[in-house]
Image (cartoon, helix red, strand yellow):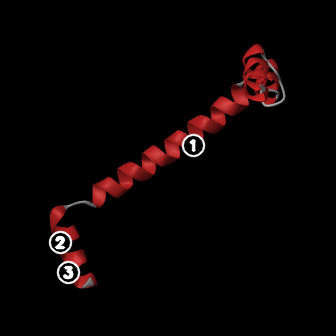
Amino acid sequence: MLKNIKFYLDNASVDWMGIVSLVIFFLFFVGLVLYIFVMKKDQVDMLKNIPLSQDDTNESNSEHYEN
């Protein structure tokens, strides 16, 4: 069975798809790491505190469900 799969993949020239997907995967994560290191300190602090901050929408939703 593996011989058949290898035979069809060799004849279909699908090997470039693996290389392209690996390059896209690598570039995405390198870009993400660069973006994180370039971020400003105040933006990182704001994003870090989002789960702990309480805004008006959270308070109004909690009041709605308590009644």
Q: Quadrant of the N terminus?
A: bottom left
> Residue 43: x percent and y percent?
76, 20
Residue drawn at (28%, 83%), measured in percent from left and top? Answer: 2
Taking depth in this image into account, of 33 and 56 the one nearest to the observer is 56
In the picture, measured across the screen, residue 61 lies left or right of residue 35, that is: right
In the picture, measured across the screen, residue 6 lies left or right of residue 48, that is: left
Residue 29 badge:
1
Q: Circles 2 and 3: CB distance less than 8 Å?
A: yes
Is residue 40 in sight in this rendering?
Answer: no
Taking depth in this image into account, of 67 and 52 the one nearest to the observer is 67
Q: Quadrant of the C terminus?
A: top right
What's the distance in space between the residues labelled 1 and 2, CA to CA? 32 Å
Is residue 12 in sight in this rendering?
Answer: yes
Q: Circles 1 and 2: CB distance less than 8 Å?
A: no
Q: Amino acid at mark 1?
A: Phe
Q: So how many labels did they put on this image?
A: 3
Residue drawn at (79%, 31%), measured in percent from left and top? Answer: 51
Q: Quadrant of residue 9?
A: bottom left
